[in-house]
Amino acid sequence: MKQQKKIIISCAVTGAIHTPSMSPHLPVTAEEIAESSIAAAKAGAAIIHLHARNPVTGKPDQTPEAFLPFLKIIKRETDAVVNLTTGGSPYMTVQERIQPALKLKPEVASMNMGSMNFGLFPMLNRFKEFKFDWERAYLEGSKDLIFRNTYGDLETVLTELSPNDTRYEFECYDTSHLYNLHHFVERGFVKAPLFIQTVFGILGGIGTHPDDVMHMKRTADRLFGDSYSWSVLGAGRSQMNIAAMAASMGANVRVGLEDNLWIGPGKLAPSNAAQVLKVREILDGLGLQVATPDEAREILQLKGRDKVAF
């Protein structure tokens, strides 16, 4: 893969993995999500990856109506690329999960590239008390959870979203997911350039060892050549280590409270922007430049912010 001149920083502002009780800094309401997104963009994130929450209970909410209030503010206050989840929550159906991206037509939508075990229950070793009744059961239930992304599901997402000229952040949690993506490229469902997010450290997916990172890169290079942009996401405490390693090889990076609540050993990150600023320090130390939103649009060949439906 050709090494690009500038590194795209993505920030996953809030997601379905962590529950509100785990950190007081996790944005939940539309106002909090908008504020946190704007701050992350100002800190240097070119792409903002977004989930929505019920403002009262904090539960993941995949209705388009839950997204609209903060999307309008983010679009007004920043020029960041908006990336809407189609992952939603592992407990949702594929039709529930695609509704925001289907109706709001973002420039980018995330797409999980295979079914997998998705173990959230180890978080119970650290967190013992929860604000909402659903949170403990949500984590405990992941012992028997299969995050469903069948070939039929993937074909549904690609078939329904592609007419909107939405491109994808292909989230690949293991080597097989890269092969699944290659299958859809061969069938003509997906066209280059590809934006491939290799994910490390989720129980059920590939680990966080440097050999794991290199294995995913070698496999992607072999399957896709120079037709993709590589990005990395390290879950939990591996976030910055993997970002540093991969960025030195030309990778884009993703940070944010969806993936990691911490900024250092035993210290909760005070905001998404704090993680963006920390990864920028790493990139600066490596002599790498950060891409602006418009440069990210050019690298990924996006349709432009004027063609979204929000």
Image (cartoon, rainbow, N blue to C red):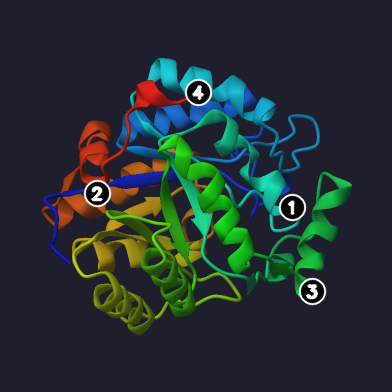
Kindly report the distance in space between the C-alpha atoms of the residues bearing marks 3 and 1.
Answer: 15 Å
Tell which tag, 4 or 2, sits nearer the viewer: 4
Task: Please name which of the two marks, 3 or 4, marks the residue nearer to the observer.
Answer: 4
Locate residue 170: give its quadrant.
bottom left
Of marks 4 and 2, which one's residue comes earlier in the chain?
A: 2
Tag of residue 92: 1
Are discs 3 and 2 less than 8 Å apart at CB?
no
* Eye-nearest disc, 3 or 1: 1
Residue depicted at 33% across the width and 82% down the height? 215
Foreground: 155 or 301? 155
Is residue 180 found left or right of 2 in the rendered image? right
- Residue 101 visible to an observer of this rendering: yes
Picture quarter with the N terminus: bottom left
Which of pointers 3 and 2 lies earlier in the amino acid sequence? 3
| Residue 104: percent from left, percent from top | 54, 29
Q: Where residue 166 sits in the image (x, y, percent)? A: 43, 40
- Residue 53, compared with residue 263, is above or below; it is above
